[in-house]
C-alpha cells in the first residue's frame, strides 16, 4: 500500500484527497545494478536506466615486437529497459560506446513460452550468454572468443519448465552479426538447452557462497549457409565469422575464389558448470564444421576449463583457466593451434556492481613463432 | 494538491513539516508513449525519457535476382525531451540507432508564434512530418520517400490560430540534410500551411473512431540552390537530394560536369486528409522542378492515395494505397517511372504504443525490366 | 525527514505503515543544470540524466573565397552521472552527438586524494578544463584550440587542501586522444596545480556579481614521446597533436620521414584569472617544445587575454579577447603566425542554463594571404 492509501484507510484523508495526491505519483527509486527506476503502482509499467563501465589497463609483453601499455574503456554500456502495458511485454535497449547492442521486445505467454523480436544474443555457448559483467576473469576465454555468434537480429522463443529444471532458446536470425541485414534468403538457425538438476542456476561465473550445490549441463547448436553476397554485410562481433571462418574482411570475389558459391557451417557446444560453498567450476567445448562448395570440409574445436574459489566470501576470489583452440585439418591447422593459461584475482566491493579484477595470461601460439605473449590486465567495473 | 499540502490543510502536519517533506520531491511517473517522467510541481520543468522500437521482417520476392529474407531493427529511437524554466521553453533530443536525429530548443511566445533553433524536420509534406510511429502502413509511401526533405539544421517559426483552424511553419535551413554544415551561403527556404476547417487534426494516419469528421488541407513549398562545394556535405536522409536529384554520392567535379556551377530546385506539395468513424483517407501530391545552370530544366512529380478502415475499432484495421512517381522529361523519365500498390492489416494492442502491422507491396518499375518486385513485410512496434 | 517519518513521529501511521509506504520510494526531482534526478534517502545513490544543446549560426566572411552561412549543432551532450554505494564512488558517462566523451569512475579517499580511471579531460590549461557551457565567449580561444590535450584515457589523482587554497591533478594517459588505445609503451604524463588565495574559484568564466574578489593562479605541464606506430591511432580532439604538431592525419612512413623514429614534445601553461563585482578577467600562456629524433627542435607559444563585465548583473554581459599563436622557429613559423580579436555580448535568461551569445572575430592569419577572415556567430544554449 502507498502512504496515500494508508492515510485513506485511517480516515486521515478522503477518497478525493487520495485520488488527487496519487496523480502522476508513481514509484521512483534507485535500484543498484539496474539504475534509475520508475514503476507504476500496479507494476504494469517499469523502466530502468543505468550503465556499466569497465575501465581496463593492459600490459602486453610481446614475444618479439613492441610491448604495449594501454588504458581502454573496454565497455561503457547504457541501457533503458523494462515492461509496458503488462508485466509480460518487456523491452530492452542497450548501447555500448555508442553502438546499438540490444534492441528487442518480448512477450511472455507463459513461463514455458516467450517470443522475442529484435537484436540480442543468439542461442549459443553459456559463456557468451553470461554477461561480460559477471565473468570469473576480466574477459571471456580464447575458445569462446573464437566460436561465439555474438548478437544478431531475428525471432526467437524461450522458456523454462519445472522451476528452471529445463530451459530452452531457439530462433531464426539473419546470421550476419548485429546491425546487419540479410542480403539473401539463407538464415542462421540456433538453439540451446539447459538442464539444472539442482535448481535455477543464474548465469554468473563468480563463486558466491551458495548454500546448496548448483549444477548446469547445457548444449547449443547453430548452422547457416553463407553466400558471396553476404560479404561486406558482416559484423565482426560474430567471432565465428570473423575469427574462426575468417570471412569478415573479404569481398564476394575472394569468397567465391576460396569457397565456391557457398560455405555451409555448423557449430555445437556443450558445457558443465557447478558451484558450491564459494567454489565455482566451468567447462565448455565448441566444435565447428565448415563445408565449402569447393574444396574439402574441415573441422576445428576448442574448450575452456576454469575454476575459482572465494578465499574471503563475497570479497576475495582466486581463479585459474586453461583454454585451447585446435584443428586437425591441414588447411585450418595453423590458425587454430593456440592455447592460453590464465590466473586471476578478483576483489569485490559490492559483488559485480563494484569490483577490481587482475589477471595474467600466458599465450602459446603456433600460428606464428613470435606470438607467445604474456598479458597482464587490471580492470575496474562499476554498475550504476 | 500534493499529499503534503492536503495534510497541511487538515492540520495533520505543520508548515515546517510541509516544507521539509516537499524538498527534492517532485512528481515522478511513467507516462505511456513518453516514458520515464519527472515534473516539477509548478510544471516549469518536465523531462521525459523513452524510446520506440520497430522490429521488422521483410521478404523481398525479386523479379529476377536473389530473393531476400531479412530481419531489421528499422528504428530504435531514444529521446530526452521536455521543458525547462517555463512551460514555453521546450527542447528535444532524439537518437535513432545512435545517430542524432532531433536536437532543438524552442520558445513559444504565443500560440501563434514560436521560434525553434537546431535540428528537426523541415516544413514539407504531411506524411513526412507524421511520425514513422503513426503511419497507416509499415512505412511511408514511394512518393514521400522520393521527394521528402527529412531533417535539417536551421531556424524556424511556427504557430496556430483559431484553435488550429490555421497552422503554419516557415524556416531557413542549411539544406544539406541532418548533421551537415553549409559550405556556402545558399540556404534552403521552406514553409507549410495547414487548414483544419473541422478542428485540430493530429498528424496520425490511423483511423481511430473519431466522434466528428476531421479534415486537413495543406500545402508546402521549399527551394534551394545547390553548388559544387555542397557535394560530399550531403546527408542522404534528405531523399529529395539523394533520390530525386541524385546528388548525394557525387563529387564537385561530377556536379559541375552535370549541372554547371549550380542547380536550383524547388518542390511543392499539397494534401487532403480526412477521418471519420474509423475511416481514414489521405492523398498528397509532390512536384519537383530542377533548373541546372547548364542543360535544360526538368520536372518530376508523384503522389499517393491511401484509405483505411478499422473493422474492429482501435484493434483491427485494413488499408490500401497507390503511389506513383513520374516525369515527362526525357532526361529524367526512366528514374521516376515507378508505382506501388500496397495492402495492409494492422493489429493494435495499445494504439500506436504496441501494434503489429503486415503489408504487401507490388512494385511496377520501368527503370529496369527486372524490378517488378513483390515485398511482404511484418513489423512489431513498441513505444516505451 | 520524509513525510512518512513525520507522520510516524506524530503517531498518525505505525512503524509497519512507515516501512510499507517507504518501499521503492526514493527522492525523485528535476535539478536545473543536472536534469532528472533520483536519490536514495541516505544519499549513497544518486543519478542525474540531462543534456546541453548549443545551436549556432555562423557567418564566415572569407577574405577571398566563398562566404559561408551555416547553422550547426555545435554540441548536443547527454549525460548520466552520479554516485553509487557511497557518496565517494562517483561515475560519469557523457556523449556528444553520439560520440563517447566522458566515461570514468572515481573514488574519493579524502578531499586531498581521489583516484579516477577512464576517459576524461587530462590535466592541462584552465580554459580547456572549463566547460564549453561556462565560457565567456561562444567558444574557447585560438591559443587554447591550438595547444589543448582534450580528453584521454588513463589513471589520475586529484585533490584539494585548505578549502581549495591549493588544488592539484596528476595522471598517466595513453596520450592519443579520446577513444584510442596505445600501440606502444609510451604514455603521456600530465599535471596541474591551482592556487586560489581568496578562496574556491569555480571554473566559470562569466562575470557573475561576486561579493568578494576571486583570484586563481594555475600552471600545467604535460609531456610525451610519439612513435611511428601511434600514427593512425590518434583522435583529433587532442588539438596539440592535430593542429600544433600536425600529426593527426599522417601515416607511419610520413612520420618517420619527417621526425625519424620518435617525436618528443612537452607543453606548459600558466594562467591568472580574477573576478569581482561583475567583472571577469583571464589570461593564459602556452608554450610547446618539440624535439624530433631527426632535425632541429622547435618551439611555439600562444596566449589569450580576455575581460568581461556584466552591465546588467546576471543578464547582460560584454567581453573582449585577444589571442595569438606564434613561433620564432623557421620551420614552424608560418603555421603559428596568427591572431584573433573578439568581442562578445551575452544575454542570460537563467545563467548558463539558458543564454544567447553573439560574438565577432577578426582573424589575422599570415599562414596564407587570403585568410584574414571575419566571423560572426550567434549561439543559443539550453541545459536541461
Image: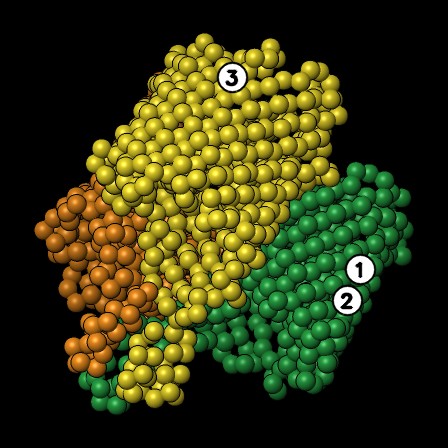
Chain colours: A orange, B yellow, C green
Q: Secondary structure at mark 1?
A: strand
For the N terminus of chain A, give its image quadrant.
bottom left
Q: Which residue is mark 1?
A: C342
For residue C61, what is the image quadrant?
top right
Horizontal arrangement in the rendering, residue C68 relative to residue B308 (left or right): right
Residue A315 point in image, percent of width and height: 33, 71
Residue B161 point in image, percent of width and height: 51, 48
Q: Are marks 1 and 3 on the same chain?
A: no
Labelled pair 1, 2 in contact (Cβ < 8 Å): yes
Chain bearing mark 2 = C
Q: Secondary structure at mark 3?
A: strand
Give me the residue at 47% from left, 11% from top.
B366
Query: On screen, C353 above or below A177?
Result: below
Determine the CA span between mark 1 and mark 2: 8 Å
Foreground residue among A174 and A211? A174
Chain bearing mark 3 = B
Whichever of callouts 1 and 2 sits on the residue coming sooner in the sequence is 2
Horizontal arrangement in the rendering, residue A135 relative to residue C192 (left or right): left
Q: Secondary structure at mark 2?
A: strand
Which of discs 1 and 3 lies nearer the camera? The answer is 3
Residue C236 point in image, percent of width and height: 66, 50
Residue positioned most to the left: A162
**Label 2: how many residues lie within 10 Å, few (<14), some (14-19) or many (20+)?**
many
Foreground residue among A166 and A299? A166
Give me the residue at 55% from left, 34% from top.
B220
Q: Which residue is mark 3?
A: B326
For the C terminus of chain A, give its image quadrant.
bottom left
For residue A231, what is the image quadrant?
top left
Give me the residue at 44% from left, 31% from top.
B272
Horizontal arrangement in the rendering, residue B139 relative to residue C74 (left or right): left
Chain bearing mark 1 = C
Q: Which residue is mark 2?
A: C319
Amino acid at each position: 500500500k502507498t502512504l496515500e492509501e494508508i492515510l485513506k484507510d485511517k480516515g486521515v484523508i478522503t477518497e478525493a484527497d487520495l485520488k488527487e495526491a496519487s496523480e502522476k505519483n508513481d514509484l521512483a527509486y534507485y535500484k543498484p545494478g539496474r539504475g534509475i527506476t520508475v514503476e507504476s503502482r500496479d507494476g504494469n509499467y517499469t523502466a530502468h536506466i543505468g550503465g556499466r563501465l569497465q575501465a581496463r589497463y593492459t600490459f602486453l609483453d610481446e614475444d618479439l615486437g613492441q610491448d604495449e601499455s594501454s588504458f581502454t574503456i573496454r565497455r561503457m554500456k547504457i541501457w533503458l529497459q523494462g515492461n509496458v502495458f503488462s508485466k509480460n511485454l518487456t523491452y530492452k535497449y542497450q548501447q555500448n560506446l555508442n553502438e546499438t547492442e540490444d534492441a528487442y521486445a518480448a512477450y511472455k505467454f507463459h513461463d514455458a513460452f516467450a517470443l522475442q523480436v529484435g537484436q540480442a544474443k543468439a542461442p549459443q555457448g553459456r559463456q557468451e550468454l553470461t554477461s561480460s559483467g559477471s565473468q570469473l576473469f576480466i574477459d571471456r576465454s580464447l575458445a569462446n572468443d573464437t566460436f561465439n555468434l555474438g548478437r544478431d537480429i531475428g525471432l526467437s522463443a524461450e522458456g523454462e519448465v519445472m522451476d528452471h529444471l529445463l530451459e530452452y532458446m531457439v530462433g531464426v536470425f539473419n546470421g550476419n552479426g548485429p546491425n546487419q541485414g540479410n542480403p539473401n534468403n539463407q538464415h542462421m538457425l540456433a538453439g540451446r538447452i539447459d538442464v539444472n538438476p539442482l535448481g535455477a542456476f543464474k548465469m554468473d561465473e563468480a563463486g558466491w557462497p551458495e548454500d546448496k550445490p548448483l549444477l548446469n549441463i547445457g548444449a547449443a547448436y547453430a548452422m547457416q549457409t553463407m553466400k558471396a553476397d553476404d560479404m561486406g554485410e558482416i559484423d565482426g562481433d560474430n567471432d565465428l565469422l570473423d575469427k574462426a571462418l575468417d570471412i569478415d574482411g573479404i569481398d564476394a570475389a575472394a569468397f567465391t575464389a576460396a569457397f565456391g558459391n557457398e560455405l555451409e557451417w555448423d557449430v555445437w557446444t556443450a558445457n558443465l558448470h557447478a558451484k558450491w560453498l564459494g567454489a565455482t567450476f566451468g567447462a565448455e567445448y565448441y566444435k565447428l564444421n565448415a563445408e565449402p562448395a569447393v574444396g574439402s570440409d574441415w573441422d576445428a574445436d576448442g574448450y575452456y576449463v576454469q575454476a575459482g574459489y572465494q578465499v574471503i566470501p563475497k570479497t576475495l576470489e582466486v581463479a585459474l583457466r586453461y583454454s585451447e583452440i585446435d584443428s586437425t585439418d591441414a588447411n585450418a591447422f595453423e590458425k587454430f593451434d593456440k592455447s592460453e593459461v590464465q590466473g586471476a584475482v578478483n576483489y569485490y566491493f559490492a559483488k559485480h556492481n563494484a569490483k577490481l579484477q587482475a589477471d595474467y595470461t600466458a599465450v602459446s601460439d603456433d600460428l606464428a613463432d613470435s606470438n607467445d605473449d604474456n598479458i597482464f590486465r587490471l580492470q575496474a567495473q562499476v554498475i550504476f
